Amino acid sequence: MNIVILDGVLFVASVLLIIGLRKLSHPDSASNGNRLAAVALALGVIVALVYPLETQNNNYIYIVAGICIGGIIGIISAKKVPMTAMPEMVSLFNGFGGLSAALISLVWLVNNHFVSEATELGIVLFNLFLGLVAFIGSMVAYGKLSGSLKDEHLRIPYSTILNSLLLIIAIVLIIIFSYSGQLSISQTVLFSILSLLYGITFVAPVGGADMPVVIATLNALTGITAAISGVITDNKLMLLGGVLVGSSGIILTLLMCKAMNRSVISVFFGNFSGAKEAGQEVEGNAKEISASNLAIQLAYSQRVCIIPGYGMAVAQAQKVVKELEEILEGKDVEFKYAIHPVAGRMPGHMNVLLAESDVSYDKLLDLDDANTYLESADVAIVVGANDVVNPSALDDPGSKIYGMPILNLSKTKAVIVLKRSMNPGYAGIQNPLFFKDNTKMLFGDAKKSIEKLLMELKVV
Amino acid sequence: MNEIINFFEQNIEIIYLLTFAVFLGFEIISKIPTVLHTPLMSGSNAISGVVLIGAILVIRVTEPTNYFALIMATLGIVLGTINLVGGLAVTSRMLEMFNKKKK
């Protein structure tokens, strides 16, 4: 009887989780979706606590202690993290989830004295592998995003070959170990180290500009390993939740790749940002504009469009951009934001930053709408974006980003680029946009430049 | 080979569930607006905190004297909870920002 009730609760939780995720993908119901998912997961945890098991030692004291410690750390770090550090935070959490799944496999092995029938052992080892890869991969991604790991430090020679070799060895080991039906402690340690090495070579060569893809992929990996943990512990809610996360992560990965016109394979094996060579030498002089001239130009424009990029996050310029919006709207200027899907370092990075400074999301245009808008816009201000506005993608077949859909500024009347210097962007590719006739540069820190602009605008 | 066939026979339910869930996942999440990419990612990231359930289930069958396994499983619980609770809290913080300016 008890079991029937518990299974029923688990079933209800599964349905709630599906509805929650469904709601999470619509702007109006997203908050409710998040709450529903929380309820579903809480129900799942409660059921897991009391579900009758074969050999029950319970060890409740450890469980309660673990949940308390984890809960406190989780809540505090979620409250404290600034919105600009969101990509790091998400990959850190994601790594924890992966390690947790790996530990489930490890404890399962210990509990079963490292002996089991082949298929089961194979699944557990595979899960250990995936969990560790998701963990260490997320940690490398965290290091890259927070700036403590630079791409230069992570240049691994022959990474593609090494990477494939490690993967093959891991698969062979899984097969050998599972056929023998048992493994020793030292074999487990060795296998774990191999998994970690593979995880590092998997993420290390991926350049900063490809980070949105990597984060989405790692998210999918953790989802898959959660699903497999669900198979191991025979829990349908975990299986379902994991698979849903896995498929959502895969969809996001594909979306991001599509937004860059690159295949998943070229992202992980291509070494995008490694080379610092330009596809085509760009000749010409960039023209400068002063803040006061720009202020006058903006005040007499009708339609202005901001194109934010990672530089906006670095300069923390989202607040002053919002002030610019308010001042110009006070002068009856139409003000929009053009959001490229891969602007920033994680999927939707710019949206979050702008939302933080209270920009209404009907002012945010996605790629297609933005390009229509830009055709008739008077001024487009590029704030810290580079590769997503690079016209080489449209007209230079020799360029590395050729074919990537970009925000097309060729028909916009005036383009203003806020930039520190003439250095090429993260991807190391020269940007002919800077030398176009309709482009002017406003050099300096994006935030300071806009602040200056705001001062000038108040006088106009 | 036999073992694999046996495995399929014994777990046919799970295999069904797995297949349907994959399609369901794709169906639910395709056509998501760009605005929600980050909340969806952090939300789904939080959901991968379900591993907490697995950690609870394995620690409940661990022998109370096997301290290595106990410590590892407790660590798994801590990490799973951080993923779950932290992920949900971060997501709700993000979504609050989206909602606040709608008024």
Image (spheres, rainbow, N blue to C red):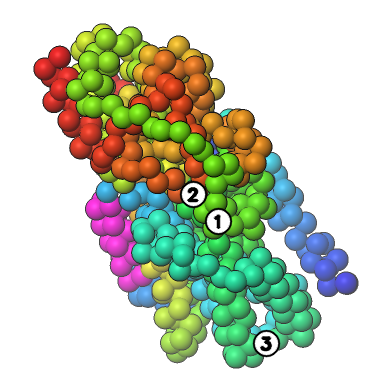
Packing grade of label 1 (10 A; few <14, some 14-19, many >=20) is few
Packing grade of label 2 (10 A; few <14, some 14-19, many >=20) is some
2 or 3: tag closer to the N-terminus: 3
Q: Position of residue A151 (x, y in %)?
A: 46, 62
Q: Which residues are magenta?
A: A65-81
Would you name the residue on which mark 3 appears?
A183
Would you name the residue on which mark 1 appears?
A275
Marks 1/3 in contact by CB < 8 Å: the verdict is: no
Packing grade of label 3 (10 A; few <14, some 14-19, many >=20) is some
Which image quarter: residue A274? bottom right
**Which element is circle 2 on?**
loop
Would you place residue A405 above or below residue B8 in this image?
A: above
**Which element is circle 1 on?**
loop
Would you name the residue on which mark 2 appears?
A428
Q: Magenta includes A34? A: no
The residue sitting at the left extreme is A459
The residue sitting at the right extreme is B2
Q: Nearer the viewer, residue A246 or B71?
A: A246
**Which element is circle 3 on?**
loop
Q: Nearer the viewer, residue A53 or A217?
A: A217
Can residue A415 be spotted in the picture? yes
